[in-house]
Amino acid sequence: MKLTCLAITCGGTGGHFYPGLSIARVFQRQDGEVLLLLSGVNSEKQREIAESYGVPAVVLPRMPSPKHARQFAAGLAGGVTGAYRELGKFRPQALLGMGSFASFPAIFAARLRGIPCFLHDGNARIGKANRLLSRQAKVLATAFPPVNGGTSKAKRTVVTGMPVRPELEAEAGISKEEAVAGLNRAFDAGLKPDLPTVLIFGGSQGASVFNRIAPEALRSLDAGRFQVLHLAGPDKLEETREAYRDAKFPLLLLPASEKMGLFLGAADLVLSRSGGSTVAELALFGKAAVLIPYPYAAEGHQADNARYLADADAAVLVDNTDFTARRATELFRDFLDAPEGWRHRAERARALAKPHAAETMLAAISDYFDSTR
Ligand SMILES: CC(=O)N[C@H]1[C@@H](OP(=O)(O)OP(=O)(O)OC[C@H]2O[C@@H](n3ccc(=O)[nH]c3=O)[C@H](O)[C@@H]2O)O[C@H](CO)[C@@H](O)[C@@H]1O
């Protein structure tokens, strides 16, 4: 049976929503019919984003946090009822859950309707919600080889990679010259294609610790030898601008940008957090990185993501508590004085890339239907 109609539940944070949206867009390009079932704090906004890409989405009743058992049970009941109704109208062949407790109602409703369920986890450690739901799943797919793969109760566990935004994936082969020229055109940035380039960003929200420490470290180096791209975070521009005051090196400083392909393409070294999408994009663009995992990520999953690259000598992992201006200066200096080591890391990163993860995920679902024919 060919897979032609799929529902995807991807509420919760951007880390669950965007990979789900990427799969939906790729499925539409394959002429598939798709519906997103969204629940969680950001679902109204996420519905608007999905619809701006022509992807239909419905918002399910909001799920309270699992920390409050009674409200959670009541919210779950409301969510399951809503999802049951939507799945009855849409009648998908399969439901794909992208992780988080926000996917519970849709998965339970699909089970009640006898619709086969599939899961995707975007980190190197299978999250709690996916572990609990895995028994319900025909396939649990993961972005990276999971450090706790044995906890999955799914019939099959496969590594598909992390679905990356189609625009970004298309730009993965961009040369540094093209990327620098693109940034200069877009931002009138005055960057030079032949200077070693450092990109700094702290995930989608930015990280104040980077905004304080990186400028301090960079200002202690010889200004003529490098240039800097820094995405400070949506509300962190002023603090960062202040930290770079009087800096003598070329600097492109923005709160955030949609043009990540140009930023990653122009970089020779990336200093960042290690969220699932960031790690996948570093590999896809073949970039050497210094990774400082967000220390409060659930069950330390950002450290597991970072280790996936660091263990392959594709990145250097620095614990958040060890990330001082002194350590940052040492690392930047090594990057400028001994670039071969970092070029080697970049090659190692590229070797770990899993392009077309959305297609691979969809193929894993199709394979299930082929095998049950
Ligand atoms: C704090 C936290 O728990 N974050 C989690 C959240 O991450 P979150 O979604 O914040 O972080 P990710 O690294 O997964 O994604 C960041 C995304 O933002 C994009 N970007 C960033 C800056 C910018 O200016 N423009 C831009 O487009 C990057 O290209 C990337 O695609 O979900 C991920 C996947 O489950 C987890 O691994 C992370 O641990």
Image: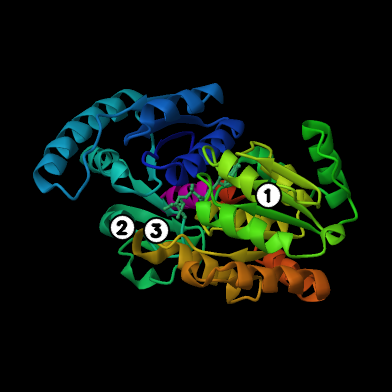
Q: Nearer the viewer, mark 3 or mark 2?
A: 3
- For numbered disc 3, what is the local secondary structure? loop
Query: The disc labelled 3 sits on which kind of residue?
Result: Ala
Asked whether mark 1 and ligand 1 are closer than 8 Å, the reply comes as: no
Please identify the quarter of the rendering in which residue 11 is found.
top left
- Is residue 15 left or right of 241 when viewed as pictured? left
Asked whether mark 3 and ligand 1 are closer than 8 Å, the reply comes as: yes
The circle drawn on residue 297 is 3
Q: Are marks 2 and 1 in contact (CB under 8 Å)?
A: no
> How far apart in space, not on screen, are marks 1 and 3 (Cα)?
28 Å
Q: Does the magenta-highlighted stretch encompass residue 362?
A: yes
Q: Where residue 191 appears, x then y in whole percent?
A: 84, 45
**Residue occupied by mark 2:** 134
What is the crowding at mark 2: few (fewer than 14 residues within 10 Å), some, or many (at least 20)?
many
Query: The disc labelled 1 sits on which kind of residue?
Result: Tyr
What residue sits 47% from the left and 70% below the top? Answer: 321
- For numbered disc 2, what is the local secondary structure? helix
What color scheme is it? Answer: rainbow
Residue at the farthest front position: 246
Label whose residue precedes the other's in the sequence (3 or 2): 2
Q: Which of 370/182 is in front?
A: 182
- Is residue 34 left or right of 77 when viewed as pictured? right
**Residue occupied by mark 1:** 244
Label whose residue precedes the other's in the sequence (1 or 3): 1
Residue at the farthest right position: 194
Q: Which of 159/79 is in front?
A: 79
What residue sits 53% from the left and 67% below the top? Answer: 306
- For numbered disc 1, what is the local secondary structure? loop
